[in-house]
Amino acid sequence: MRRPNLSLRQLILLAVLVGIAAPALVVLTLSDRLTRSSVEPILASQRAAVLSLASTSLVDPLWVLDESATKRAIEQLLADASVCSVSLLEERPGAQELKTAKCSQGWPTVDMAAGIKRDGVVLGTLTVGFDDGATDKLVRERQQQIVAIVAFQVVLGGVVILMVLYTRLIRPIDRLKRQASAIAAREPHEQGDWQRGDELGELGKHLNHAGEQIDSLLADMEAKNTQLRQMAMYDHLTQLPNRTLFREVFTHEAAFARRHRHLMALLFVDLDRFKAINDTMGHAAGDRLLLVVSERLRAAVRGSDLVCRISGDEFLLLLRDAQSADMVQATVQRMLDSVSEALELQGGQQAQVTASVGVALFPQDGEDFDELVRHADMAMYQAKQDGRARYAFYEAHLDAALAERMELERELAEAIRGNQLVLHYQPIVDAATGVVRAVEALVRWQHPTRGLLYPGAFIQVAEESGQIRELGAWTLEAACQQLSRWKSQGRHPGSVAVNLSASHFRDQRLPEQLHELIQVHALAPGELTIELTESTVMSDSEASMKTIHALRDLGIELAVDDFGTGYSSLAYLKLLRPKKLKIDRSFVRDVPGDHDDCVLVRAVLGLAHALDIEVVAEGVETEVQRQFLLGEACTLQQGYLYSKPIPAHDLALRLNAWP
Ligand SMILES: Nc1nc2c(ncn2[C@@H]2O[C@@H]3COP(=O)(O)O[C@H]4[C@@H](O)[C@H](n5cnc6c(=O)[nH]c(N)nc65)O[C@@H]4COP(=O)(O)O[C@H]3[C@H]2O)c(=O)[nH]1
């Protein structure tokens, strides 16, 4: 059976009512019987006493037959309030029964009789009719008293119990309930003042404590939630929205723009050569630069436009109400100008960075976020291809070629990290003796689907995407490791040459890194040759020269690669003082048949000998070329005539065979 759903207050009230009123009712119900049972013996003994007294008072008058005294005694008896009627029957012969009554006919009476005796002689019988209505009256009076007492008890008991229960139980429980509800509903609530030492006081104190803990947990959770939301939706460095939030806002705005036929522009901004700046100036400087750039981007657009950072040096911007392509163009140009202004980094370092921007318009260049971002990304690539520090609008025909190129970049990043790169080695031989003097490490990419790729297929991509630094680091590590392994196997190929490109030389930390590498692999500095091209030295010559000098100071050898193909500056050659010059194979290819090439080779050899620089002829494919070069005292030669670049394992077998 379901219990009625009563509140505590109702239940207590009910309990009090039942607990107090029920006994009272029982008392009242039984009071008639109880009163009667207590009153009746009293009345009976009173009546017996009256009867006995009356019969005693009649003894003498009856003995002496004094009629008047008998009457007086009977009248006296009749005067008693409890007596209704008196009847006297004398025992003497001829005596008449004497009957007197004062109550009306039919009045309830209780008749009691007693014999009147003297010296054992029965003189008569006295019968007294006692008023039975007196019993009821007495019982009623008693009952009224009981009712009054019970009522007083019920009221007083009820009031006292209810007051105590209300002040000591119901009210505190109400307070506890309110406090607990406020805690549960996470409403602001005050601590209860629980001074009392009973169970409710204890409970109140526990609730206060629990409330405090819940408040602090909630505050903690709130703070964590805010932090998580901040982390999930905003970039931690610049505090700009991140891609997730940008996508949300874009989706919302796109629906609005579609309804109101507004034009929106999505801008993909990528900083040019940021990675190089980050690597050369350090990460703190890179972070500061990103902060300044993000400020500039924000300032260049309207407050209602959205700027977000999606990764290292990439930003997305949403121009909500673009109005026209011309307006977008003006905004983007303003933005590019602002970004490229010189800025001061910590410690007064000056820096300058430019950005390439790709623009895709909504809805014409893409219906959804991913498509639009992809197209803006492609347009940004186009801007990079066009020479950086500029913008390009997405055009449908960009798709195929750029997508392929971007895919290649992504794959290359995976390749560098996923160990898909391998080094092949090509010996540099003393043509007079056939002894291997050195090996050049040349990188290959073991592509998972396209087979072995040669540097021509990916070095430029690595250069342009900034991945060349990572690739170079990998090559240096792998080459040094290999040389060290050969050495430990007793097969020393002289030294190993590694190609590094211009951006490596802009990094002032390169000497330190190479020094560490040499130490780790227990190589002598002279066992590592760095090949660089003339154009490397020419670009950003001041910074590169600093690095080059530091390398030379370390004892690391330098070789100028492809000599003769760049803007050969003799002044630089003097400054560089490389250990080796490598005559480009385009000059070797046609010797001795081509007179000009022969003159050029001789000139280079003459110059190098004068400056005490060794010369390596590249691309030697034929015996005739070998003989010609030997005849010109160019003994160090490299080319297919001796060996193509081959895997380390194959080269080791060859080294066994060579003197
Ligand atoms: N036709 C012909 N070619 C010959 C002959 N002997 C050698 N070669 C090729 O000439 C290139 C010599 O390397 P390089 O001038 O440093 O030119 C290299 C170098 O500038 C660059 N490269 C290679 N590996 C790396 C690397 O690890 N880092 C960087 N930054 N560049 C690299 O890629 C260029 C091309 O490398 P590869 O394709 O391996 O091409 C190699 C080699 O296979 C020959 O007798 N005839």
Image (tube, rainbow, N blue to C red):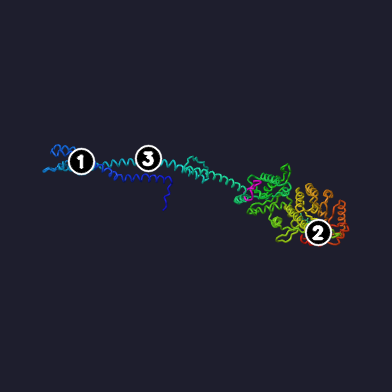
Element at badge 2?
strand
Q: Secondary structure at mark 3?
A: helix
Residue 171, given in percent of the width and then of the height, sits at: 45, 42
Q: Judge left or right: residue 173 versus residue 140.
A: right
| Residue 259 position in % (x across, y down) | 59, 51
What is the secondary structure assignment of the residue under circle 1? helix
Q: Is residue 243 magenta?
A: yes
Question: Vertically, is 212 above or below 415?
Answer: above
Which amino acid type is shown beneath numbered disc 2?
Answer: Pro
Instruction: Give ligand 1's quarter of the image.
Output: bottom right
Local packing at callout 3 (Cα closer than 10 Å; few below 14, some 14-19, many 20+) is few
Relative horizontal placement of residue 262, taking residue 442 as reference (left or right): left
* Disc 3: which residue: 156
Residue that protrudes farthest toward the front in the picture: 119
- Quick one: label 1 or label 2, which is nearer the N terminus? 1
Could you give the CA–CA distance between mark 1 and mark 2, rounded to whole angstroms? 159 Å
Which residue in the structure is indicated by mark 2? Answer: 427
Q: Nearer the viewer, mark 3 or mark 1?
A: 1
Residue labelled 3 has its Cβ within 8 Å of some atom of ligand 1? no
Amino acid type at image mark 1: Ser
Work out whether residue 133 or residue 349 is closer to the camera in this orientation and state it: 133
The magenta stretch is: 233-244
The Cα–Cα distance between marks 3 and 1, rounded to whole angstroms, is 47 Å
Closer to the camera in the image, 595 or 26: 26
Left or right of residue 70, residue 231 in this image: right
Residue tagged by mark 1?
Answer: 52
**Is residue 192 in the magenta section?**
no
Q: Main secondary structure of the magenta part?
A: loop
CA gap, disc 3 and disc 2: 118 Å
- At horizontal 28% and vertical 45% (from top left) the residue drawn is 37
Q: Vertically, is 651 above or below 324? A: below
